[in-house]
């Protein structure tokens, strides 16, 4: 039995728990401190929280798995983050200003305040929770694979996911976003080091970068270009646009914006975050090398870990597995906390009406455990690819983008009815296309079509309802 990897992986989890306990000392953990850190995070913590959206198990396993199984289309992962970071320079400062002015706690609070509609906030909260579950599931599926593979099968995937969900729920309940921020520091230092090592060592193991790509091209002509499985240039452009625009529409990413001390934080981050994307190349290199090191894998999510086992000693497998565990804990804790906050603040509070802050906070922490349990059940009964799960969630949250963009930069062009209708129609189209298993329409990502329809509905309905409001106002004035 390989004990070293197991000891290292569980040691990593214990360190994360210790950081969570330390982070909340001398803090009054009310809902604001728990969910947005008292709005006191500086450049480093905000940088790591927002960058945590890139370096997750999706990147660690999904990115390398797609390089292994899909080839050229994997480059979209490199592109969409850079698009999102460019957008953040202009989008996030006004979001932060509005949130600070109105003491917002969650993403639906933004819609509620902008349009004075608690039911619009409820709709956004429901869509957000539904989107978070598959994304969180992707993190837990990845974590389970990491622990099972790195322990050489000693710990079954479902057992690993169960332990992880218990640890994660306890971690979030205690420390909220403070624990996430502290652990993000450890996570990014570890994962960047590990990714660079394996991204160089695995290709060198098969003869170097040039030899690796030459062999892959010889064995699989066209594999390294766009066009595989219908994923051509139209798919690439539409998917990068969809995921780039939807990047900060995730409830946990949107809420992380509220934690900053000042809006300058986002402009500084926007300068350096695109460079951070370049480290993803090493993840892809590892996945491509795995094609030659461990050919014929049915589960492409295992490509990186199986290749690592074949090349590195057990203790190094443990370190890599521990780094992988951190890539699940940091974003996973943000998602769990956001889901609990959405349900308590934007569903429970509007329905109950007179709930006290203590009651809302209690409901938020209880719902962390409920969402963790639901995610656990989905994780052990689904074999969906990690990237597919992420894209499913992106199709949902990107439907918030038209309303957010217009409300910030063209407020008069969007009405309450327009915002509600656009989100509802966009989400309904995503559900229909998902149920009918239509991932591509005319070569474009189906979620992109839903986003375009959303934009049209927002503008048309807003124009119609704005005219009605003016007529009603004119009638009142005449009377």
Image (cartoon, rainbow, N blue to C red):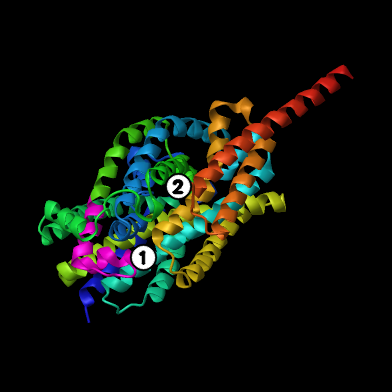
Give the quadrant of residue 157: bottom left
Percent from the top left, x then y, of residue 34? 49, 51
Residue under label 2, please give it.
443
> Reading the chain from its start, which is encountered first: label 1 or label 2?
1
Residue under label 1, please give it.
143
Which is nearer the eye, 158 or 236?
236
Stretch in magenta: 282-307
- Whether 45 is drawn above or below 313: the answer is above
Percent from the top left, x then y, of residue 284? 26, 53
Tag count = 2
Q: Which mark is residue 57?
A: none
Q: Does residue 312 appear anywhere in the picture?
A: no
Q: Residues within 10 Å of mark 2 (few under 14, many from 20)?
A: some
Is residue 300 highlighted in magenta? Answer: yes
Helix, strand, or loop for circle 1? helix
- Whether 89 is drawn above or below 25: the answer is above
Q: At 42% from the left edge and 35% from the top edge, which residue is drawn?
A: 261
Q: Residues within 10 Å of mark 1 (few under 14, many from 20)?
A: many
């Amino acid at each position: 039995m390989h004990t070293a990897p197991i000891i290292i992986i569980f040691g990593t989890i214990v360190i994360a728990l210790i950081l969570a306990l330390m982070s909340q000392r001398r803090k009054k953990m009310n809902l604001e401190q728990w969910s947005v850190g008292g709005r006191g995070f500086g450049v480093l913590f905000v940088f790591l929280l927002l960058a945590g959206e890139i370096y997750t198990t999706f990147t660690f396993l999904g990115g390398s798995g797609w390089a292994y199984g899909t080839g050229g289309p994997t480059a979209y992962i490199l592109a969409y983050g850079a698009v999102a970071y460019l957008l953040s320079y202009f989008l996030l400062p006004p979001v932060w200003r509005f949130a600070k002015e109105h003491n917002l706690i969650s993403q639906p609070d933004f819609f509620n305040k902008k349009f004075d509609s608690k039911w619009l906030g409820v709709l956004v909260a429901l869509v957000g929770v539904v989107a978070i579950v598959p994304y969180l599931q992707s993190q837990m599926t990845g974590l389970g694979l990491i622990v099972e593979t790195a322990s050489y099968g000693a710990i079954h995937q479902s057992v690993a996911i169960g332990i992880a969900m218990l640890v994660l729920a306890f971690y979030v309940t205690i420390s909220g976003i403070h624990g996430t921020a502290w652990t993000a520091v450890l996570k990014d230092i570890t994962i960047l080091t590990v990714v660079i090592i394996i991204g160089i060592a695995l290709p060198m193991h098969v003869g170097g970068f040039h030899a690796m790509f030459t062999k892959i091209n010889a064995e699989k002509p066209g594999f390294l270009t766009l066009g595989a499985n219908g994923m051509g240039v139209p798919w690439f452009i539409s998917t990068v646009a969809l995921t780039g625009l939807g990047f900060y529409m995730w409830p946990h990413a949107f809420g992380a914006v509220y934690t900053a001390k000042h809006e300058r934080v986002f402009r500084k981050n926007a300068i350096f975050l695109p460079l951070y994307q370049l480290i993803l190349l090493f993840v892809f290199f590892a996945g491509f090398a795995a094609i030659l090191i461990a050919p014929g894998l049915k589960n492409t999510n295992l490509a990186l870990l199986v290749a690592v086992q074949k090349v590195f000693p057990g203790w190094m497998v443990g370190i890599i597995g521990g780094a992988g565990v951190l890539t699940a804990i940091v974003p996973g804790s943000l998602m769990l906390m956001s889901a609990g906050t959405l349900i308590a603040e934007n569903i429970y509070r509007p329905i109950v009406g007179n709930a006290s802050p203590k009651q809302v906070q209690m409901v938020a922490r209880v719902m962390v455990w409920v969402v963790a349990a639901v995610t656990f059940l989905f994780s052990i009964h689904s074999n969906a690819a990690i990237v597919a799960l992420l894209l499913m969630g992106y199709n949902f949250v990107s439907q918030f983008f038209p309303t957010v963009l217009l409300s910030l930069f063209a407020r008069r062009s969007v009405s309450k009815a327009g915002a509600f209708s656009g989100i509802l129609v966009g989400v309904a189209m995503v559900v229909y296309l998902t149920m009918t298993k239509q991932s591509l329409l005319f070569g474009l990502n189906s979620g992109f079509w839903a986003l375009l329809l959303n934009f049209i509905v927002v503008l048309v309905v807003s124009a119609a309802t704005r005219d009605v409001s003016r007529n009603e106002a004119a009638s009142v004035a005449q009377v």
